Image (cartoon, rainbow, N blue to C red):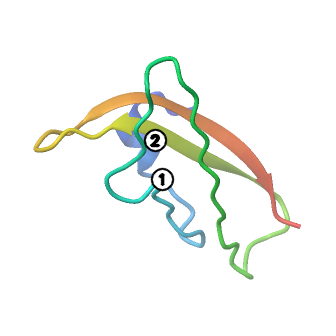
Amino acid sequence: MVTNVGHALAPVDDRFPRLAMPPFAGLSIASNATEFLDFEIAVPANVELLNYLGNSFLFQSVWHDPGEYIDRSIFVFEVV
């Protein structure tokens, strides 16, 4: 696994769309609270019927600053 966040964001499978959610200005989460975010990704017709890895990155955006990286995760999804 790529440990550097910048390097981890760079390699992508160009056949899949990029997904950036939630819409501007983001999701606000209170201390000690839980929030859920559902999303769907359109799967292109030209991909192999396999398991794929998705990456998610959680960060706090700060105006006029790069922001603060908080956490990241991977998830597996199957194209059938």
- Look at mark 1 in the image and give the residue it sits on: 11
The quadrant the N terminus occupies is top right
Q: At numbered mark 2, what does the secondary structure look like: helix, strand or loop?
A: helix
- At horizontal 40% and vertical 31% (from top left) the residue drawn is 4
Q: Position of residue 12 (x, y in %)?
A: 52, 58
Q: Position of residue 56 (x, y in %)?
A: 54, 43
Find the residue positioned furthest to the bottom.
45
x then y, percent, for residue 58: 45, 37
Taking 47 as reference, is 49 left or right? right
Mark 2 closeness class: few <14, some 14–19, many ≥20 residues within 10 Å:
some
Which residue is at 63% across, 39% downward?
A: 74
**Front-most of residues 25 and 6:** 25
Residue picked out by circle 2: 8
Q: CA distance from mark 2 to mark 1?
A: 7 Å
- Find the residue positioned furthest to the right: 80
Instruction: Evaluate if marks 2 and 1 touch, with contact meaning CB atoms under 8 Å apart.
Output: yes
Above or below for 17 versus 63: below
Q: Is residue 68 left or right of residue 34?
A: left
Q: Residues within 10 Å of mark 1 (few under 14, many from 20)?
A: few
Observer-nearest of 73 and 2: 73
**In the orientation shown, which residue stands out farthest toward the top?**
32
